[in-house]
Amino acid sequence: MKTPHTCGRMSFARWMAIKTKQTGKEPDRLETFEDTHTRKNGTYVIEYATNLIEKAHTLRKEGSADNEQIFQKLHGPEHSGRVRCAGLGPTPSTYFVPSSSSASTNLPLHRALLREKGPIECSFRALSSSSQSVPQG
């Protein structure tokens, strides 16, 4: 179900970058959903969001799952090639790390590396194209 958010024209990726800078840690998708579907006065944008967030609080109090697992349980499977509350860039193959005993501890590091990879590749391409245009002599 489509739910309106409170970000206006700001993308989720940009919102997450601002939140990361403010708090010092990257917000997970459940935190992102809750913050971007809550108005300044504390009410939720629609009843559907209210129900999801209340269920999330209940599951969080039970302590049986982390925020990512709660988010996946409440929202169901991702649509093909999409990752909810992560902006337009990430795809399931780049956002989710294959399960292993250390996957949950490596997930923030993995995402940070992926964010840095794009600008580095662009810089590399720019440098290699500029070095090709310099006359050898």
Image (cartoon, rainbow, N blue to C red):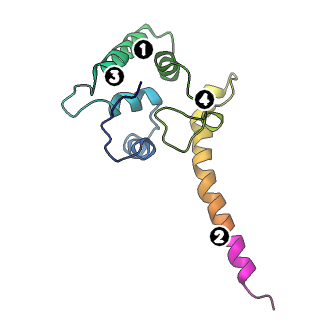
Q: What amino acid type is highlighted by mark number 3?
A: Ala
**Residue 13 percent location from the top left of the image:** 46, 44
Q: Is residue 131 left or right of residue 24?
A: right
Residue 11, which numbered label?
none
Q: CA distance from mark 4 to mark 3?
A: 29 Å
Residue 90 is situated, as x and y percent measured from the top left of the image, at 57, 40
According to the picture, the residue beneath numbered tag 3 turns out to be: 49
Query: Residue 16, located in which quarter of the rendered image?
Result: top left
Q: Earlier in the sequence, mark 2 or mark 3?
A: 3
Which amino acid is tagged 2?
A: Ala
Of the residues under marks 4 and 1, which one precedes in the sequence? 1
> In percent of the image, x 60 and y 29: which residue is there?
105
Q: At label 1, which amino acid type do we have?
A: Arg
Comparing marks 1 and 3, which lies closer to the viewer? 3
Q: Which residue is mark 2?
A: 126
Q: Report whether 7 appears left or right of 60.
A: left
Quadrant assignment, res 99: top right
| Image quarter hosting the N terminus | top left
